[in-house]
Amino acid sequence: MLGWAQNYDPFNNPLLSALVAAIPMVLLLAIIATNKITAHTASVIAIVVAILVVIFAFGMPAELAFKVTGLGVISGLFPIGWIILNVIFLYRLTVDKGLFAVFQHSLGSITPDRRLQLLLIAFCFGAFFEGAAGFGTPVAVTAAMLMGLGFSPLAAAGLSLIADTATVAFGALGTPIQALAASTGYDPFILGQIIGRQSSFFALLIPFWLVFALVGWRKMWDVWPAILVAGLSFAIPQYLISNYINPWIVDIAAGGIAMACLILFLRVWQPKEIWTSTKLWGTNDTSAEGRPAPVALAQLPTPGEVFKAWVPWLILCVVLGLWATGWWKGLVNPLFSPTYHVPGLDKMIHRVPPIVAKATDEPAVFAFTFLSYSGTGILLTSLIAGLLMGYKPIELVRNYIKTMWVVRYSIITIAAMLALGTLTRFSGVDGTLGLAFARTGWLYPFFGTVLGWVGVAATGSDTAANVLFGGLQKITAQQLGLNPVLMAAANSTGGVMGKMIDTQSIVVAATATGWYGHEGSILRFVFWHSIILVSLVGIMVMLQAYVPLFQMTVPVVPL
């Protein structure tokens, strides 16, 4: 067999092999958490260490390792880096024209309470963007919006990351579920049903969790009616749509319904005490010190000015809604979507049992579907909105160049993170970690869920984690006599709780808030939230695996 076959136990000791496999990711998180080394420097260090590990410990040929790294860098720039660049471009355009201040005021007219603004923007609005675009878009947009409303950088970044959890499994029109179906061979509708039954509980929990993280237990209960409205109006549609319609439109529909219900509810109900602090409760949140306060309006905006301030974001919703449809992709991709098969790498790496049922050649293909990238839709939105705002074409070009300079380090970091995730997959390091989790026996439903979390934390994508571990979850569950579709779904549901700690998402949040160099502070804030939430998912999956009452929620799929 030509090429190179992955070796999942190079030291003939599963535990030792797993510990070595984890070195690059653990090192990266540890360096970032110290806040003493910039994120882009830390990411470069991590990728260098990862290359050394896969070459000298796992026996990957150096030529293949460097080609995989290059493929990962390109995959980081497109589409993810492309999204971040254009979201920040749009945000800067609205700020420079003073429209973001008007937008801020209009949101405040719905409710001046920071707890409720958090629900509207981070949870409801973010869910819509996750469903339409995914890949970092909701964090970038909502973190920038919260910053514009006056939230501290740590609060805006950290809470946007936590909010982007229960929605991720259905993100980008169900892309993670499509990937999970491809890697397991199961019907995506069945997988969507189980993920919906698991995620809907956390969709109800997350709004409470968010407000608690901002203001603490007592102040959270002061607004429990609004939190319950937001949670139920999202969780119920999420459950019904995923179980009785399809898994593709879940987040777009549920997010829109939740926002409408919450706005209508706030027209007839407001808390007795308005909470205006924008710092995180219970933390030494000094992130706003020395930063300029949000621009205050000299006079109340007219209805026309308010509408003008909302126009860029309304255009963005419409454009991304169009960009996410299969109709648009089918229209533009045939026009321009060059596919590049990496020579000397494409199908030269072989994934072998027990990770897969039979040896599989890993494709190394980069599809440059530029016209259907979400980032391209955001750029089009920015150009249209910029012209409507009164910018001249040359001013748009100058502003775009300035934006490229502002996000340069973030783009480098994101590219390196994707390179690390791609190298993890192609080298078989992911398989080594997966097999270590598979040795946990009857506790596997819990640790299999945590495996999905590890996959997302390592790759930055629930889609990638489902590709990496979906097949392994199926095989291991069958060997242990567990329901394999349950464990396949758990990989995705547990994985989303790792989204808030993956370095790619943290860099996106830091970029959107302009809080460069403080990625470690964001990581330290969200880390324990992530650990507790994935543990709760693991406990739910244990109940579904072993307790008859909970097993009724999972269909039996033939082995």
Image (spheres, rainbow, N blue to C red):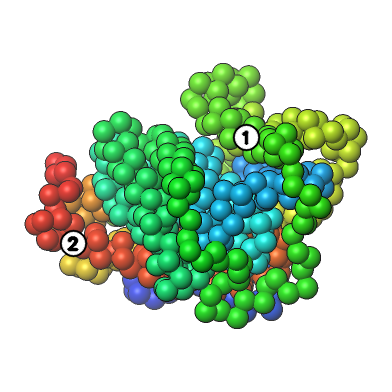
Determine which of the numbered discs, if any, sits on residue 314 in the image: 1
Q: Residue at x 88, y 42 (%)?
A: 398
Q: Is residue 29 visible?
A: no
What whole-number distance in Å separates the C-alpha atoms at marks 2 and 1? 43 Å
Instruction: Report how many numbered discs are placed on residues in the image.
Output: 2
Q: Which quarter of the image is occupied by the N terminus?
A: top left
Pick whichever of labels 2 and 1 is earlier in the sequence. 1
Determine which of the numbered discs, if any, sits on residue 543 in the image: 2
- The quarter of the picture where residue 183 lies is top left
Q: Residue at x 58, y 35 (%)?
A: 317
Q: Give the residue type that dot 1 points to.
A: Leu
**In the depicted view, which residue is nearer to us: 316 or 266?**
266
Q: Position of residue 134 (x, y in %)?
A: 52, 44
**In the depicted view, which residue is nearer to us: 180 or 120?**
120
Residue 378 in the figure: left or right of residue 291: left
Q: Residue at x 37, y 45 (%)?
A: 233
